[in-house]
Image (cartoon, grey):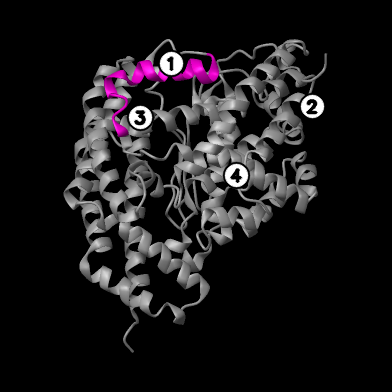
Amino acid sequence: MARSAYEELESRYEVLSRLSSMAALLRWDSAIFMPPGATVDRSDDLVALETIRHHLGSNQEHACLLAEAESRSEQLNSWQRANLKEMRRLWMHDSAVDPELARAIVKLSGKLVADWKQARKDNNFLVFLPGMEIMVTLQREIAEAKADYLGVTPYEALMDAYEPGARCSQIDVLFDELAAYLPDLLNRVAERNSGCAGNTPVRGPFDISSQIKFCTQLVREIGYDFDRGRLDQSDQAFTLVGLRDDVRIAVRFCEDDFSCSITAAIHETGHAIYELGRPARWYHQPVGRSRGGSIHESQALMYAMIAGRSREFISYLAPLVIEAFGGAGPAWELPNIARSFLQVKPSLIRVNADEISYPLHVILRYRLEQALLNGDLSVCDLPGAWNDGMVELLGVAPDSDAQGCLQDVHWSRGLFGYFPVYALGALTAAQLYQAACASSPDIQLKLSCGDFSPLTSWVRKNIHKQVSRYDTNELIARASGNPLGTEALKTHLKQRYLHETVFGIGEK
């Protein structure tokens, strides 16, 4: 019996999914194991894969199948209709972009990542500047082409690839509320903590192999499946997504600060558990993809920031840290180690930022990349604009571009429009965690034993298994009972950092 148009599309999207998985695996290898001399050849490999994927996903035959399947959508169930809707969205993204332009960005990103690494190592923005100027030009071309297809602004067209349906009108309201609220809260918490029990710095170095061993055991206990993953060391923490039974995590380990390594490992575990929880039936279909960047980030931030820095979990974690890395003296007393995970102060590096500062780092990047794309900011002026924005939002400025505009890999990889998902993810994480605890009161109690399973069960049912069946706003509203807003995050931050007492934090 001949397959229907919809069935043919499912078959095609499985192939497209597997091609994307191959590309993801090659990028993972580039970051972890690939010798530096292979950069050009690896870029050509990725260009070849992108050429095949782009052609299959945007050719005329594909368009005809979509039209025929849509004309008979009443014959499909709710999951299939949601899948067809996502197929159409992906087709619009692919067909809007000239194949030569798509290949040019993939090829440029391979070289630009290498330039970024060298520029950051040498603290020399000029190494990065020429390639970044080309990347911004290419991103403008893509944004304008996609905007016409999607009927949105150019920047929204870029965001839609990472956060489906995102609109600046909604994001601006949320981010403006945070930008108005968080700096004052940051100052209040810093002033309050200055009168609290002191914190003695925990001095390194801390052996990297010991940190890897500790984090491996910790994330296994949290629920990471090492039969379908692995943990490696990298310059940037990330999770390999898109492979059904191969979800690897990488962490940047720092000899001077074990707490950053531990938090990063838990963060990536949140990403991985989401990936491993997606329903097998839809794994290689668009509807089976994770529901955009903000939902993905919400899972990681919920595990690492909200649950991972809770009073209950820190009470469990701190003794383990002392046993693994402990020395002598006041720095290694239990209250001091617990407090080391809960310090709040303006910082230069986004990935090491505390819960209050973190969204402000993201808002800065959101504003800067919009200015770059619409021509209000030239690439050569990026370092100065970055430093000015840091002073405005966080009250600190970097001494070097390596700690400033060169700290993130995203722009060198062409991920313009991705940064907003981090702050949206923080808002979503707080709102989902509030709903989860209201539904399952034992979540916080179990965290005191290091047990994340009640939390994982709730998000698996309400988020992981739903994948892209609903749009983002509906998914959040169904799970939490409310549309996305700022109140849950504000309430969480005030409760934790102004009202709770955790090992001396909060005691005058």
Mark 1, residue position:
388
Of callouts 1 and 3, the N-terminal one: 3
Residue 431 in picture, x, y percent from top left = 66, 45
Task: Identify the residue position indicated by label 2 in the image.
Answer: 499
Which amino acid is tagged 2?
Answer: His
User: With 433 as the anchor, is 115 left or right in this view?
Assistant: left
Image quadrant where residue 187 sits:
top right
Can residue 285 be seen in this snapshot?
A: no
Query: Range of the magenta residues?
Result: 374-395
- Report the residue marked by disc 3: 371
Label located before the other in sequence (3 or 2): 3
Amino acid carrying label 1: it is: Asp
Circles 2 and 1 in contact, beta carbons < 8 Å: no
Mark 3 near mark 2, Cβ–Cβ under 8 Å?
no
| Identity of the residue drawn at 27% across and 45% down | 144
Instruction: Identify the amino acid type marked 3.
Output: Ala
**Which of the image's four quarters has the C terminus?**
top right
- Front-most of 496 and 210? 496
Marked residue nearer the N-terminal end (4 or 3) = 3
Q: Quadrant of residue 341?
A: top right
- Disc 4 element: helix
Dominant secondary structure, magenta: helix
- Per the rendering, the mark at residue 428 is 4
Describe the element under mark 3 as helix, strand or loop: helix
Mark 4 or 2, nearer chain start: 4
Q: Is residue 381 magenta?
A: yes
For marks 2 and 1, the one nearer the N-term is: 1
